[in-house]
Image (cartoon, rainbow, N blue to C red):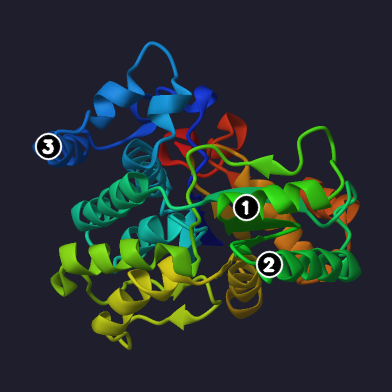
């Protein structure tokens, strides 16, 4: 039996190629119906309607009040599909919104309560829509660590943030990339200050607010007012948060977990790289499983492992060699990798 760490993706992972993902993969129709009943009660389109649409709509499927529920359900469905006779799960983390999914996967909230949290926070962020995000890499195509480049980019961020009426901050430390959040003046200034790369960076993230910054304080306050402390319980599995802190089963203050989830997790920078580093060093899993939807988080996981010098990896070629010899990363959004760990694929 292989040991595995679970990594839950965040916003921006349910896109055109993921349309129909729940219909193809979600293993519990009764649970999905409960999710849809909650959305219907709020006057929102059901996940079944969204996922079963004949055409993907950027305007509809990526907005926070829809994307959060779709991504949470896809992640949880994949988690429930893992063959526990072949895979022993030792810890769970997530990227950004994936923290809400990680809570449910680890048992710190029920599946239904986790959906309530994800759907509520996604809706609140969409309704407020404060600021935006832009993403920019600090490693090259070889994925080799370049701390000097990162330092230079952070200096640009600090200089822009010091200007009157400009807000810019690190939202997510995402492997070899920085996700920055700010107001329009701050984001535009950064886009003008850096060199265009690969024909797509700096890249604005559509329908994304200034997540993980102090600009989200009003949203965090609304979330605390709407989401009861009773939703949280002791986790069954260790949880690694966006600071790299471990929440161990049977030792968690559920009030503290709620305070973090609806406080610092919303308003402070999210260090995904640190979370993956802690996963690797503290739990040494045989396998890192990235649940769906999407496949984009796999690169950030690999880059984070390289930055941690895990198994002596120093760049992309090292990672590819390790992966080819004995896979250490499995993305459930890729059918061939999903088949190696899902119950349906292994029987």
Mark 1 residue element:
helix
Which quadrant is the C terminus positioned in?
A: top left
> Which residue is painted at 44% across and 21% down in the image?
57
User: Residue 212 versus residue 237: which sits nearer the camera?
Assistant: 212
Q: Find residue 301 and report its horizontal and vertical position in percent.
A: 66, 56
- Identify the residue under disc 1: 185
| Residues packed near mark 3 inside 10 Å, few (<14), some (14 to 19) or many (20 plus) | some
Cα–Cα gap, marks 1 and 3: 40 Å
> Which residue is painted at 53% across and 23% down in the image?
17
User: Residue 347 versus residue 276: which sits nearer the camera?
Assistant: 276
**Labelled disc at residue 163:** 2
* C-beta proximity under 8 Å, tags 1 and 2: yes
Direction from residue 150 to residue 203 in the image, left or right:
left
Q: Give the quadrant of residue 237.
A: bottom left
**Labelled disc at residue 258:** none
Q: Is residue 21 visible?
A: no
Direction from residue 155 to residue 74 in the image, left or right:
left
> Which residue is painted at 42% across and 66% down in the image?
266
Q: Earlier in the sequence, mark 1 or mark 2?
A: 2
| Residues packed near mark 2 inside 10 Å, few (<14), some (14 to 19) or many (20 plus) | few
4 up-or-down from 247: above or below: above
User: Residue 344 versus residue 114: which sits nearer the camera?
Assistant: 114
* C-beta proximity under 8 Å, tags 1 and 3: no
Q: Residue furthest front?
A: 164
Cα–Cα gap, marks 3 and 2: 47 Å
User: Residue 176 versus residue 316: which sits nearer the camera?
Assistant: 176
Cα–Cα gap, marks 1 and 2: 10 Å
**Labelled disc at residue 37:** 3
């Amino acid at each position: 039996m292989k040991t595995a760490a679970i990594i839950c993706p965040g916003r921006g992972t349910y896109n055109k190629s993921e349309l129909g993902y729940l219909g193809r993969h979600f293993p519990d129709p009764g649970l999905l119906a409960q999710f849809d009943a909650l959305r219907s009660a709020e006057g929102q389109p059901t996940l079944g309607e969204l996922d079963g649409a004949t055409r993907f709509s950027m305007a509809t499927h990526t907005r926070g009040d829809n994307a959060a529920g779709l991504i949470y359900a896809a992640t949880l469905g994949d988690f429930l599909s893992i063959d526990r006779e072949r895979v022993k799960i030792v810890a769970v983390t997530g990227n950004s919104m994936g923290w809400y999914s990680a809570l449910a996967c680890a048992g710190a909230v029920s599946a239904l309560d986790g959906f309530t949290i994800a759907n509520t926070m996604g809706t609140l962020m969409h309704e407020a829509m404060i600021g935006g995000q832009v993403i920019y890499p600090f490693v090259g195509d070889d994925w080799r660590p370049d701390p000097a480049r990162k330092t230079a980019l952070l200096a640009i961020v600090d200089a822009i943030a010091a200007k009157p009426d400009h807000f810019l901050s690190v939202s997510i430390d995402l492997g070899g990339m920085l996700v920055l959040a700010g107001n329009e003046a701050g984001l535009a200034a950064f886009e003008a200050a850096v060199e265009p790369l690969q024909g797509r960076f700096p890249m604005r993230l559509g329908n994304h607010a200034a997540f993980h910054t102090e600009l989200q304080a009003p949203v965090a306050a609304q979330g605390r007012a709407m989401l009861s402390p009773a939703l949280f319980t002791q986790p069954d599995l260790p949880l690694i948060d966006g600071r790299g802190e471990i929440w161990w089963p049977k030792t968690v203050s559920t009030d503290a977990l709620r305070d973090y989830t609806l406080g610092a997790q919303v308003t402070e920078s999210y260090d995904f790289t640190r979370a993956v580093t802690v996963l690797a060093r503290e739990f040494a899993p045989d396998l890192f499983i990235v649940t769906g939807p999407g496949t984009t988080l796999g690169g950030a996981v690999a880059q984070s492992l390289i930055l941690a010098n895990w198994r002596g990896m120093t760049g992309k070629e090292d990672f590819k060699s390790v992966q080819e010899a004995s896979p250490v990363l499995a993305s459930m959004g890729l059918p061939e990798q999903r088949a190696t760990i899902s119950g349906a694929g292994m029987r």
